Amino acid sequence: MKIDHVHLVFLLLLTLITTGCESEKIEKFDTGNLPENISFNNDIKPIFENQCKSCHFGGTSPNLSPSEAYLNLTSGGYLNVEKPEESEFYVIITTGNMAQYATDSDRAYILKWIKQGASDN
Ligand code: HEC
């Protein structure tokens, strides 16, 4: 089969469109699979280590490195345990500038942690 120019352009467009959609695919994450109790040390700090370290471990504020994260999140007024969904921290990583760096799983863990009182546990 001979592929002419029109077909080539069409194939190229198709590839662009499908790969474009690929990156915007909404992640499926089952929030029912979260542990019963979320631990800041074991569940939340690793998120910062994996997703945020390159910028927030001493560079850009807030500093989310293991020894600094809890203090900076609480003293920075980022958390609202009365209305967890309205916590500035949750909003920033969900619909704000930092949403691109967090996964659905990260967001679910962080929201549940805030709902449970945002302890340094
Ligand atoms: C590539 C670098 C980079 C990564 C990775 C990154 N951030 Fe950021 N972050 C920034 C920059 C730059 C700003 C300040 C400008 C802005 O708000 O866009 C910022 C701002 C913030 C703020 C708001 C600070 C304020 O008080 O206005 C929070 C909270 C935050 N980041 C959390 C996170 C979390 C949580 C992660 C990981 C899930 C993350 N960031 C990943 C670069 C990054």
Image (spheres, rainbow, N blue to C red):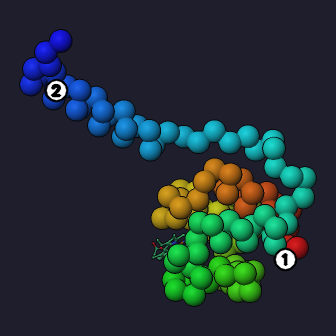
| Residue 34 locus on image (x, y percent) | 81, 49
Which residue is located at x 75 percent, y 57 percent? 109
- Give the camera-side residue of 19 and 115: 19
Mark 2 is on which residue type? Leu
Label whose residue precedes the other's in the sequence (2 or 1): 2
Q: Are marks 2 and 1 in contact (CB under 8 Å)?
A: no
> Residue 83 — which label?
none
Element type where label 1 sits in the image: loop
Nearer to the camera, 79 or 17: 17
Q: Is residue 15 above or below residue 88?
A: above
Q: Is residue 93 above or below residue 41?
A: above
Q: Is residue 63 above or below residue 44?
A: below
User: Which residue lies at the image location 81% right of the left edge and 44% below the top edge?
Assistant: 33
Instruction: State the residue lying farthest toward the left.
Output: 5
Instruction: Name the image quarter holding the C terminus.
Output: bottom right
Query: Disc 2 versus disc 1: distance between alpha carbons?
Result: 57 Å
In this figure, which residue is indicated by the disc labeled 1?
Answer: 120
Q: Quadrant of the N terminus?
A: top left
Q: Position of residue 40 (x, y in %)?
A: 81, 70
Report the residue marked by disc 2. Answer: 8
> Picture coordinates of residue 5 (x, y %)?
9, 25
User: In the displayed image of the protein, which residue is found farthest to the front?
Assistant: 1
Q: Nearer the viewer, residue 17 or 72?
A: 17
- Answer yes or no: is residue 118 visible: no
